[in-house]
Image (tube, rainbow, N blue to C red):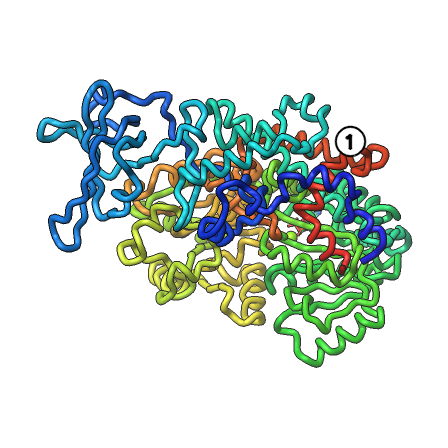
Amino acid sequence: MSEATCDFLVPPSSARIAHSSTWREDISRLLYVSGAREQALRRLGIERVGDLLSRIPYRYLDFSHAHDIESAPIGEVSTIVARVDRVVERRPRPRLSVTEISLVDATGVLQVAFFKQPWIARQIAIGDRLAVLGKIEFAYGFKQMTSPHYERLDPAATTGSILPVHKVSEGLSTAWMRRIISVALGRLGSFADAIPADLRARHGLMSAARAMRAIHFPVSFVERDAARRRLAYDEILILQLALRLRNDANLLGVRPSAHLVASHVRALRESLPFQLTDEQQRASDEILRDMADPDRIMNRLLLGDVGTGKTAVACIGLACVADTETQACVMAPTGVLAEQHAARCGSILDKAGVTWALLTGSTTPAERADIVSRLADGKLCVLFGTHAVLGEDVCFRHLSLVVIDEQHRFGVNQRNMLRAKGIGADLLVMTATPIPRTMALSVFGDLDTSVIRHRPIAGAGVATRVLSESSRDIAIGALRDAIARGEQAYVICPLVEPTDQGDDLEEVFEDEDARDSGSSQAAPLRNVEQEAERLRQVLGTARIARLHGRMPPREKDRVITAFRSGEIDVLVSTTVVEVGVDVGGATVMVIENGERFGLATLHQLRGRVGRGSTPGTCFILTRAAGKLNVQARVRLRALERTSDGFALAEMDLRLRHEGEILGLRQHGGVSLRYVDFDADTDLIEWAHDDAIELLGSSGGLRSARTVPLRLEVIDRYGDVFKEVSGG
Ligand code: ADP
Ligand code: MG
């Protein structure tokens, strides 16, 4: 590890003592924590007071609207707080236990029964105050509740009328958990607030100590929500700072490459068969500026729908690497895509005199050995490839630019493995999948973004229709008409062969309905093999070909080439066509089992048609409307209404439990627990701006004002810095 890194990682000792007072204390120091309970906490991964306080309630019971027994309406769900008057455990049959509890308040009696939970009788005693939440029934002259959610109230640890419920495990009760958290909160007096007071005031955020108290024991739900926002702000700001620091060359002890812009860039620009659009021009200027900067490592996202001309822009970056006499690596998620890059960029690079090679899983050992040796001695400038480039034997003489295409398809580890081959190398991430801004900011806070919104050649566009499977004839009719006019069509199926299961889907999305109904009941998903056969019978003389990920690369190539040159009318395919395959003459697409795909995927797929001068139509077939849940239908209908990929990605995000969409919530071991990507747009923007401001101010995070914040960054992300700097 370099000295600079060490220096950052070691906090000033006085600050460390003040800050660590409570948060880092071992839980055994807390009153009541010992013996079996201490062991139970440790089994939950709770070692320090901070770990304990980080376990925020998973639900809150609201007693502000509790009823008395008399007024609780029969047939409705109510919360009742009352005193335990009687506890009886009965065993009417050998393996059935019934715990009967009578609750009384000033207005009446409520009979509560629990089945097969014999331990309840041991936990609850006559005289306890009990809160129960459940449906009120009436029988045998009494109001009753069966197996309600219940809490024994411990007045000492509760404030107000909202009762927090923390997750516990065997050996711990929720009541005890509340008490122990309340003890821990009582010691938070000296808690140093990581966020400088002026920033808190600017955004109207409560103090850290108050937020901690309020998230555990809120006086109102408004207060609870404000507390969550404060904690979410911390979470994002600290991640932003860590991400930015992680790319701080000084910190890493590396010198960023100061790329040169010279003859190769000029030659490449001149050899392009077209004039760059303004957007392409701006994007390439931004990239070259970053690459030339001797003080910063580039971290740039090049965002643009398929066909917006990202390839040419990336090639300019590659030529700049040639001018600098260093090396670049372009990694794509699939063989088809890597080959396509190599084919497209390769011809441009050749004209500009830039050497390149392609390395995929199907490269022969002899070729591979040749490529590896030319990379090692620096004779080869640009390497295109798939994961194959991550191989241990693949070593660059001086890797100064890493280009990753369709970034979201790679795991964080893969991204890091490639970057580790050239510490301090500039990074360009290309993606056609719009990442909602809030998510891009919070998770890739360090990525600057260049956006290309418009295609250089505007196609005629595509209209989308969502049809239930019973209306398949409409789609097939349109397909037949298109072929008769000499146009081409795609049919997309989720599976390759009839024997495949839903698990074989490359795409991760399933609508909840499909998951609930189980594979045995759900209608089988469409597959490429049978669909091609079916179409052959329906379409007679049409030339039909299949394309899927299991075909040998050479075979795939042959099919794509034949389709491109018009020798094939209908391509029956899996989502392998989603990324990259680009054929101008296609006008109709039929997507089977549309409910099985995410909006982003469907949007990418339909972007394949209507690229030329004839407008396209995309039919999305789904199970009968009645069998599809409302959410799935709303989701698909959005495709009919909008062609804005960004809007769709945001919608996907809202409907699909936010972060799960790209697996971003758990990003490289970072887990974001408080932030709500949808609701916290403002917080995310603030944190983004604040991180830049804090790091840009004199002294950066080392000023007295930001010492606690710096400690917090180190505490949460110190490992990341060690990993990057190889320490
Ligand atoms: P992307 O990588 O963003 O999907 P490509 O770089 O493959 O897009 O470009 C799509 C098509 O547009 C290619 O055929 C390319 O030659 C063409 N193209 C790119 N830029 C321009 C431009 N400025 N003018 C005309 N055609 C362009
Ligand atoms: Mg592309």
Question: What residue appears at the point 69 percent right and 31 percent down from the top-left corner?
Answer: 195
Can you give x and y, in whole percent of width and height, for residue 496 in the image? 42, 64
Count of residue discs: 1
Q: Where is residue 132 in the image (x, y as percent from the top left)?
A: 29, 32
- In the picture, the quarter occupied by the C terminus is bottom right
- x 55%, y 51%: residue: 585
> Can you say which quadrant of the picture contains the N terminus?
bottom right
Decide: is 600 above or below 411: above
- Is any part of residue 451 visible from this angle? no
Percent from the top left, x then y, of residue 77? 26, 28
Can you give x and y, in whole percent of width and height, for residue 101 in the image? 21, 35
Q: In which quarter of the image is residue 344?
A: bottom right
Residue corresponding to mark 1: 705
Q: Which amino acid does label 1 sit on?
A: Arg
Q: Is residue 633 left or right of residue 413?
A: left
- Pick the residue in front: 78 or 583: 78
Front-lying residue, 193 or 379: 193
Instruction: Give the image quarter of residue 160.
Output: top left
Which element carries disc 1, helix, strand or loop?
Answer: helix
Q: Badge 1: few (under 14), some or many (20 or more) residues near its Cα, within 10 Å? A: some
Is 367 placed above or below 480 here? Answer: below
Residue 160 at least partly seen: yes
Left or right placement of residue 177 versus residue 699 in this view: left
Above or below residue 65? Residue 726 is below
